[in-house]
Image (cartoon, rainbow, N blue to C red):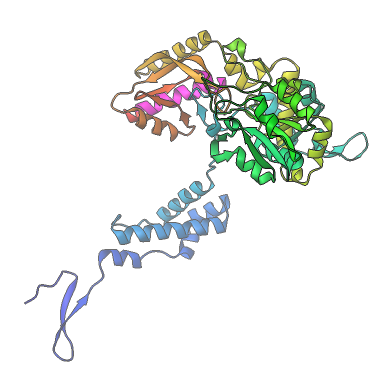
Amino acid sequence: MRRLSSNNTQQLDRTGMQKIQSYPSPATSLLRRLPSVDRLLRSASAVELIERYSQPLVTDALRGALAETRQSLATGEIESMPDDEGFVRMAEWIIADQLAPTLRPVINATGVIIHTNLGRAPLSAEALAAVQAVATGYSTLEYDLAEGRRGSRTIHAEKLLTRLTGAEAALVVNNNAAAMLLMLTALCQGREVITSRGQLVEIGGGFRIPDVLAQSGAHLVEVGTTNRTHLQDYAQAITENTAAILVTHYSNYKIIGFTSQPDMVDLAALAREHNITLLFDQGSGILLDVAPYGLEPETTVSDGLRAGCDVVAFSGDKMLGGPQAGILCGRRDLIDRLKRHPLARAIRADKLCLAALSATLGHYARGEALKKIPVWEMIARPVAEIDVAARAWSAQFQEAAIRVVIIPGESRIGGGSLPGTSLPTRLIAIQPTGINADELAGALRAASVPVIGRIQDDLFLLDPRTVLPDQVDALIEIVIHTCHKLG
């Protein structure tokens, strides 16, 4: 006789033929006992959860908890079912995960000062205070107090920008890509723009100069070669339909060796001779000389304007050390055209950006950028001071029985600024027992306040240069706790 499974029994149907009747499996029995959402909502813990959040949110979370349990029972991942309180706890976890912010503070111990992935330039205390002041109430964003009527947001930060750069006028938009698009659209649409092949850059996120030119409606005219472009190349390319010569900052790469590019002064003279404009995508927003800190000099915004550029575009959140912004400085008549262009409204800066930018520019105007702007504090920090900090950190780690070693290293500017240059630093290599660098890095990223370091030669490294002073204690505590937990 055929053996039947334990869940089956034999019966005879009306014809006398043997048939098999199935009993429910344990998982099926549990599935039938799943509580209803209405029943769970009436529990005391669910009522309390609704008071903290809202009924729609809790209802959706309970449905999610039930669906997750149903799936786990069906696949055999679990063999028992939570009680009603367990389902409510699951719903609470689901809500916490849904409401958890994805934009979170981290501790940057990578040694990359302007770290694009980590938010670029941290703001000064004064910039943060300025943001809070205009964010928590009303402001004069577009109100003229003297006249008692509507004003213009374009005036904010303009006086400081013209004072610091020497430009006749300035305009702030929401980022430098937008600044470039506005500049090319308003001044060059339907006409030719000449640029060197060696400057057809692509930066992070696939942003390419040729694509921006195409979007603006301007026509790209490439001259020269990748490594060498001469003044005569530009001169021979000028036609009646030429609107501008565009010079682009190299951003995140560097061409070395057998290279040549015309001097900006000569390009400006050529542009004036043919009554066309010279546009400069300076990019990094650098206003100060970096040579005193051992870095390779870079053309500043003021250098470009003094050389004869008609409009210079640059970022607010790179070497400038302020909020994300695109800044356009130059001739008044050209900046006025940019202000009046319809695209300017679509890409305008908001009150928080303008407040933070004005406060940041104030540090430059008062001659305190090196002491107040975090980016410049990090750049100017002597390696001897970093060495002292590294030794102090190491002592605390060693007291907690964590093996570390201090090694020489390099910090980088980052953010598409000063490519190929670095600053000497001291690195703390963490050597916990029983785990590798990747495991430690992953655990630190999962901390309540994530700590981001770097891995080099299978070592997990911390660079004190980019850790803000008020984050040091937290970093040391998190690293010690994580190492002990893993070990």
Q: Is residue 270 left or right of 30 when viewed as pictured? A: right
Q: Is residue 481 magenta?
A: yes
Q: Range of the magenta residues?
A: 465-484
Magenta stretch holds residue 296: no
Residue for point 52% across, 44% down: 100
Q: Main secondary structure of the magenta part?
A: helix
In this view, the residue in front, 168 or 81, is 168
Q: Residue at x 56, y 35 (%)?
A: 203
Looking at the rendered image, the quarter that the N terminus falls into is bottom left
On the image, the x and y values in percent for residue 5 come to 15, 70
Q: Position of residue 349 (x, y in %)?
A: 72, 38
Please identify the quadrant where the C terminus is shown: top left
Q: Give how far across and how far down residue 406 sits, in percent.
A: 40, 13
Indicate the quadrant where residue 3 lies: bottom left
The residue under the point 43% across, 52% down is 90
Residue 466 in sight in this render: yes
Residue 100 or residue 283, whichever sits in front: 283
